[in-house]
Image (spheres, grey):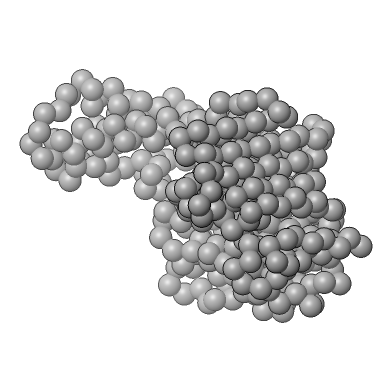
Amino acid sequence: MKIKRFKAENFRNIEKCDIEFTDGVNLIYGGNALGKTNVIEGIYLFSRGRSFRTAQEKDMIKYDAPGFRISVDYESLDGVTSLEYANFGREKRRRKNGYPVKSAKEMIEGFKAILFHPDNLSLVKGGPEERRAFLNVAAAQYYPAYISDYARFSRALENRNALLKNASKGLYWDEGELVAWSESMAEYAAYVYLTRIEYLKKLEVYVKEIGLRISDGKEEISLEYESDVTEGADTENIKKEYVRILTSSLEKEMIVGTSLYGPQRDDIVIKINGHPTRGFASQGQQRSIVLAMKLAEGEVIRDTFGEYPVFLLDEMLSELDEGRRRFILDSLKGKQTVITACECEEMKPLASNLIEIKDGQYVSAYR
């Protein structure tokens, strides 16, 4: 899979841009706050369906502009596809090959991209919510139906929590409605759980292999899914297990006013040589784990869809020491990569496309 072109209008600080990309390494360089990350953000939005920087799309509209418009053209085994997204306040337009599509899921399910970003270190040192977020994004690219399953699970959870909150405050709540939302939550929790388990097993194979390569065979990284239910059962049995857990915990949950069990509280336990990393992993080990997990994402996508995704590195290389920087660049040979950097002299010889930001313009020099 390769991105061919990215266009933007009134997106962040980009008044207008039209950037063409080549195979290999595409290096976007320039000073701070000129718009390098904005390009990565716009491209990645077509893979994830939303920004990795903000939950508010209004933040992506250029100051004093009525809205923004972005688009990508990419080539995959299915041919060339164009995607467009426009946000003008209440009016949002999504198009695929020129035709309107109703949902973000329809627009994004074909384009695959892996993002490397300095904030990725929170995968190791952050709380469980950081690892769940990683798993949700990665699993959605691996199995697009996961987006719908997780949305239905979230809706059931939200409604169940609203009833539990009323109960905790002594307000009216309907027992039958609570039972119905609990059953719906259990059903979609089973889908979410099993997809996560399946994905994590595939990911771990490559994480171990890549982790050993980074550490010269000294450190084996393993991933364990931490949940309330037992791994290995089929969908119906997992659903029954969730129903049992939600039923038995009801009295406690009505006191605290929220759901205490379910995939929304699960975690990934990351280990090095059998020891949990939280609390002891060095900065270097944390970076190695993140690199291994991100590169492994790409391998799972290649195995599943027959081609690598686009790799997006936003100011990531400056965060790495020379050894890890060399490792990641060697690992990405033969794969299309878009890299942003301020200090880029050592990167220039590796790039097939140099994109310099000058006076708000993106100027390319192909090699």
Image location of residue 337, percent across then percent down: 76, 57
Depth check: 323 or 25 in front? 25
In this rendering, position of residue 94 left or right of residue 174 = right
Residue 220 falls in which quadrant of the image?
bottom right
Q: Give me the residue at 26% from left, 37% from top.
A: 161
Q: Is residue 243 above or below residue 309?
A: above
**Residue at (15, 35) in percent of width and height:** 166
Q: Nearer the viewer, residue 170 or 327?
A: 170
Query: Taking the image as drawn, is residue 202 in sight?
Result: no
Q: Camera-side residue: 143 or 40?
A: 40
The x, y position of residue 171, in whole percent, is: 10, 33
Residue that extends furthest to the front in the rendered view of this protein: 64
The answer to whether 237 is drawn above or below residue 320 in the figure is above
Q: Pick out the residue farthest to the left.
A: 170
Percent of width and height locating residue 349: 86, 72
Q: Residue at x 46, y 67 (%)?
A: 125
Measuring 10% from the left and 40% from the top, which residue is drawn there? 169
Q: Is residue 152 above or below residue 122?
A: above
From where the camera sits, is residue 89 visible?
Answer: yes
Q: Residue lying furthest top in this view?
A: 176
Number of numbered labels in the structure image: 0
Q: Quadrant of the N terminus?
A: top right
In the image, residue 175 sits, relative to residue 44, either above or below, namely above
Residue that protrudes farthest toward the right in the picture: 367
Quadrant holding the C terminus: bottom right
- Relative placement, left or right, of 242 versus 199 is left
